[in-house]
Image: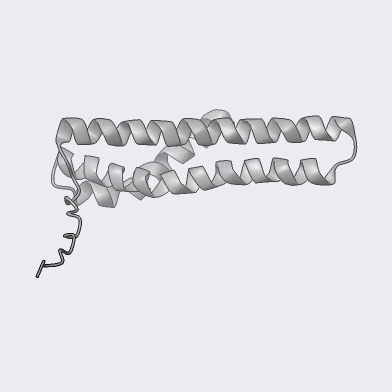
Amino acid sequence: MKKKLLTGLGFMALVALSPSVAHAQGINGIISTASRIINQLIPLVIGLALLVFLWGVLQYALTKEDNGKEAAKGYMLWGLIALFVMVSVWGLVNILSETILGSTSKTVTPPAIPVVPSS
């Protein structure tokens, strides 16, 4: 049963990714497509971790039993751990990519400070 499920999921992934692979310009196109997909999934996963944390806060506030409060503390703890790890790794990847690949964003120049001419 598991083998059929894994085979089916693998086939569906192959079918879903085949247009992007067929239209890709070599390995750079495949990496670019994978990068875009991952960059779109990161905020979604961070949002899910935030929802787990908020679910724990809500359970903690609404539960009166000690056993329920312990479970809520677990949700809050794991939500915070997930948020910390994801944001830290995301920041480290951005720092390393800008260090190794160079700056990919435009340089922002601050506005000039106005000078009052003396009379």
In percent of the image, x 18 and y 45: which residue is there?
104
Residue 14: give x, y in percent of width and height. 35, 42
Quadrant of the frame with the N terminus: top right
Q: Nearer the viewer, residue 1 or 17?
A: 17
The image shows residue 119, relative to residue 61, as above or below, that is below
Residue 109 location, quadrant: bottom left
* Label tally: 0
Residue 119 location, quadrant: bottom left
Q: Is residue 38 left or right of residue 98?
A: right
Residue 96: give x, y in percent of width and height. 25, 30
Q: In the displayed image of the protein, which residue is found farthest to the right?
A: 65
Q: In the displayed image of the protein, which residue is found farthest to the front?
A: 119
Residue 45: give x, y in percent of width and height. 49, 43
In percent of the image, x 77 and y 32: which residue is there?
71
Residue 99: give x, y in percent of width and height. 19, 31
Q: In this view, does 85 lie to the left or right of 23?
A: right
Identify the image's colour scheme: rainbow, by chain, secondary structure or one colour: one colour
Q: In the displayed image of the protein, which residue is found farthest to the bottom?
A: 119
In percent of the image, x 17 and y 64: which residue is there?
114
Q: In this view, does 101 lie to the left or right of 72?
A: left
